[in-house]
Structures are given as structure tokens and as C-alpha cells.
């Protein structure tokens, strides 16, 4: 059987790039609460007069936090206006590719809006090729070809010392998936975008009663590259008695954008304990959720009583099981949050937990007066 060639090969997620009001403080927060390690910096001290950027890593996961010092270029003005309009949020889901020029050409030829044509950045550590295309809202995908580069991040960045003492054990090892919220009626449009522009395939679909509570509902489809290294669930609101979490996000973010980032861990118990101790707040599942959990999930690596104690959710499908927990929003606006996920065979997204999770989110919405 002849194998179909990959029309848009990817190597994985390169970075999640945030535009924030104060990158220095954000870098400290993610170093402390998420156990990440500062590895690179670009700012006025090394020639970046317009922005300050801090690069943090945990295993293969990389976050970049950028704030504007003085907006003089179109890019600086975009970042400043983005923070003013949306609050702290994700502006770029950067994807590492083996050939940025070929990836950009394929994407544009198949309907993508090109934002930045391929160009090179060089320093003593080698050369990086970058290009960028638009996706939902003001989010972009920078296509990063870094096979000829061995610096700390990109040319223009210098190596940086950790802000706090490094954690003994990483809280997470990789980015599992990144979730986008889009407007009512536009989910299928963006699914088609990823199908056509990047050759992604449809991995999962959740509609109707899959993601519904007494009060609200949403619809979700998951697109992924052929290797499943890059996975993008896409959500849109659905009709309900009250405002859904997607409606709340769209209102407070001011449009579509990245809702949450799932972080892969191989020890969710140790990670959650450490992150709680550092001040991170997680959503609580009701105690009744655990009364019947063992009946349908069966045995897991973590005893049921520990799951109950830490409010960790569990789900099982035909391939195995997963453990997951969600943080509350990590900024004042009820927008971006995170998920910790530990997989044992399962390729799913916790379908069995949707009702419990969304009821927990609704309790938080009610506390904020937004349900």
C-alpha cells in the first residue's frame, strides 16, 4: 500500500506566544506557579528597544511572554492594542516545520492569509527561517524552521538565568493541545481551514448532548496533524438557557482566541500538589463525582481517594485512560486557563468529564455574575 505523502509536515509546537501587560511579572508567575525555567530574553539591554520578551521552558513546552515598552512599529502597536482590547492572551501558536518556505507557500496557495512572507534571522548560533499566517481572531501561526540554529531561542535573544530556583521535577513535559474559541456558526469554517490550509485531519467531534448541562452547551471539533503532535480543538457556543463558557470568553476577550492550553505531565499528582502550594487555583469537582467514578473508569495509576482529595478527573476510552484537571483563569478577565493531563493510552479529551467540568465552570461563572 502506497503511503500518502504529508502535504504539510510539522515537527511539533514551537512556542505559545503571549502578549501581556507586564512580561517581567508574567515570567516570574509562570516560573513560580508552573515550575518553568527562564532560558532566554530580549529587551532594551540587548537591542530590543520596543518590546521585552521572556522565554520559559518546561521539557519540550515553550512559552514566550512579550510586553510593549514603546510602540513605534506596526508590530509594537499591534501588541499594545491587543493587550488593551483583550487583556493578557495568546497571540501566536508557533509551529515548528522542516521547511518554512514550503509550508508558507502551501498554506497561502490553499487559502491562508499570509501575514509575513518567509525571511531569515541570523546570529553566531546559525539561521532561523520564519513566516506567519493568520488564523481565528487575531491569532497567528508563525512557521518556524530552526534546523540550522542552536541558540537559546531566536536570533536577537540572549541566554538568561532562571528567575527562581529550578524545580527538582518538572511539573509538565510538553504541550498536549491548544484550544480555540470561535464565534457561533464559525467552528466548521475553521475546521475546514485547517483541513485545507495545513492538511490537518479531524480527530474528534463533540456535539449536542456530548457537551451540555442544564443551562449551557457548546460544540467542539478537534483537528490535528498526521502525527498527532499538534492538536487544536475548536469550540463554538450552542443554544442554552444561559450564557455558556464560550459566550463568556468571547465577551470578555472581545472576540475569538485561544481559550486554554493543555500541558502533558507524567505525574499529575505531584504536579497538582506543587502548583497548588505555589498558589495556582484549580476548579473543584463535586464530591459526588467520585462516588461512581470507579464504576466506569476502573483502576488507574492514582488511587480513587487521591483523585477525590485533589479533585482530579479521570476518563477511559477504547485506547486507555487519562487523568486531567483544569485551572481557574490565570488573569483577572475570565479568559485563558490551563489543563494538566496525564495520558495512559487514551487519545481522547475527557468526554466523560464534560458535564462535571462544565458544571464546575458554571459555578465560577455564577460567582462572577456571568452565567
Image: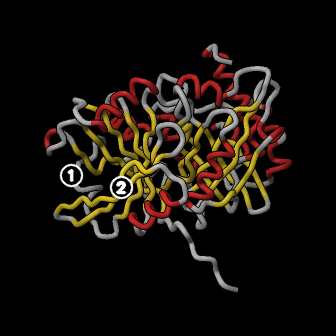
Image coordinates for residue 90, horizontal then vertical, percent: 45, 39
Q: Closer to the N terminus: mark 1 or mark 2?
A: 2
Say what secondary structure mark 1 lies in. loop
- Residue 368: x percent and y percent? 60, 16
How far is disc 1 from disc 2 in space, using C-alphas? 19 Å
Task: Decide if residue 62 is on the left or right side of residue 187.
Answer: left
Looking at this rendering, what residue extends furthest in the bottom direction?
Answer: 1
Please name the residue shown 45% across and 46% down the image. Answer: 140
Above or below, comparing residue 123 to residue 27 in the picture: below
Above or below, 119 against 253 in this view is below
Residue farthest along the top direction in this orientation: 369
Foreground pick, 192 / 20: 192
Figure disc tally = 2
Query: Which quadrant is the C terminus positioned in?
Result: top right
Q: Is label 2 in a helix, a strand or a loop?
A: strand
Rendered image: mark on residue 117: 2
Give the camera-side residue of 271 and 306: 271
Residue ID for mark 1: 156
Quadrant the N terminus occupies: bottom right
Decide which of 105, 20 is in the foreground and name it. 105
Amino acid at each position: 500500500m502506497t503511503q500518502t505523502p504529508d502535504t504539510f509536515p510539522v515537527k511539533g509546537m514551537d512556542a505559545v506566544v503571549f502578549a501581556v501587560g507586564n512580561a517581567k511579572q508574567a515570567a516570574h508567575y509562570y516560573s513560580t506557579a508552573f515550575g518553568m525555567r527562564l532560558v532566554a530574553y530580549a529587551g532594551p539591554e540587548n537591542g530590543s528597544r520596543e518590546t521585552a520578551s521572556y522565554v520559559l521552558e518546561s521539557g519540550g513546552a515553550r512559552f514566550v511572554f512579550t510586553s510593549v515598552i514603546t510602540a513605534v512599529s506596526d508590530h509594537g502597536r499591534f501588541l499594545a492594542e491587543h493587550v488593551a482590547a483583550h487583556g493578557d492572551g495568546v497571540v501566536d501558536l508557533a509551529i515548528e516545520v522542516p521547511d518554512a518556505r514550503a509550508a508558507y507557500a502551501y498554506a497561502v496557495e490553499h487559502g491562508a492569509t499570509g501575514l509575513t512572507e518567509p525571511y531569515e534571522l541570523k546570529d553566531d548560533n546559525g539561521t532561523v527561517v520564519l513566516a506567519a499566517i493568520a488564523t481565528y481572531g487575531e491569532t497567528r501561526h508563525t512557521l518556524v524552521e530552526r534546523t540550522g540554529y542552536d541558540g537559546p531561542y531566536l536570533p536577537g535573544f540572549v541566554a538568561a538565568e532562571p528567575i527562581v530556583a529550578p524545580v527538582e521535577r518538572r511539573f509538565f513535559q510538553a504541550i498536549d493541545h491548544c484550544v480555540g474559541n470561535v464565534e457561533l456558526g464559525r467552528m466548521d469554517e475553521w475546521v475546514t481551514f485547517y483541513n485545507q490550509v495545513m492538511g490537518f485531519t479531524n480527530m474528534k467531534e463533540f456535539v449536542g448532548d456530548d457537551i451540555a448541562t442544564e443551562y449551557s452547551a457548546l460544540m467542539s471539533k478537534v483537528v490535528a496533524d498526521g502525527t498527532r503532535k499538534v492538536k487544536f480543538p475548536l469550540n463554538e457556543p450552542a443554544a442554552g438557557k444561559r450564557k455558556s463558557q464560550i459566550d463568556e470568553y468571547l465577551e470578555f476577550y472581545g472576540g475569538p482566541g485561544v481559550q486554554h492550553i493543555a500541558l502533558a505531565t507524567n505525574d499529575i499528582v505531584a504536579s497538582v500538589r506543587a502548583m497548588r502550594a505555589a498558589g495556582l487555583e484549580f476548579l473543584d469537582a463535586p464530591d459526588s463525582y467520585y462516588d461512581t467514578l470507579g464504576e466506569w473508569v476502573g483502576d488507574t495509576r492514582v488511587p480513587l481517594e487521591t483523585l477525590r482529595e485533589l479533585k482530579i478527573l479521570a476518563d477511559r476510552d477504547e485506547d486507555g485512560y487519562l487523568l486531567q484537571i483544569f485551572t481557574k483563569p490565570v488573569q483577572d478577565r475570565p479568559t485563558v486557563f490551563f489543563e494538566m493531563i496525564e495520558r495512559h493510552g487514551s487519545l481522547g479529551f475527557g468526554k466523560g468529564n464534560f458535564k462535571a467540568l462544565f458544571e464546575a465552570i458554571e459555578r465560577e461563572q455564577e460567582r462572577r455574575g456571568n452565567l
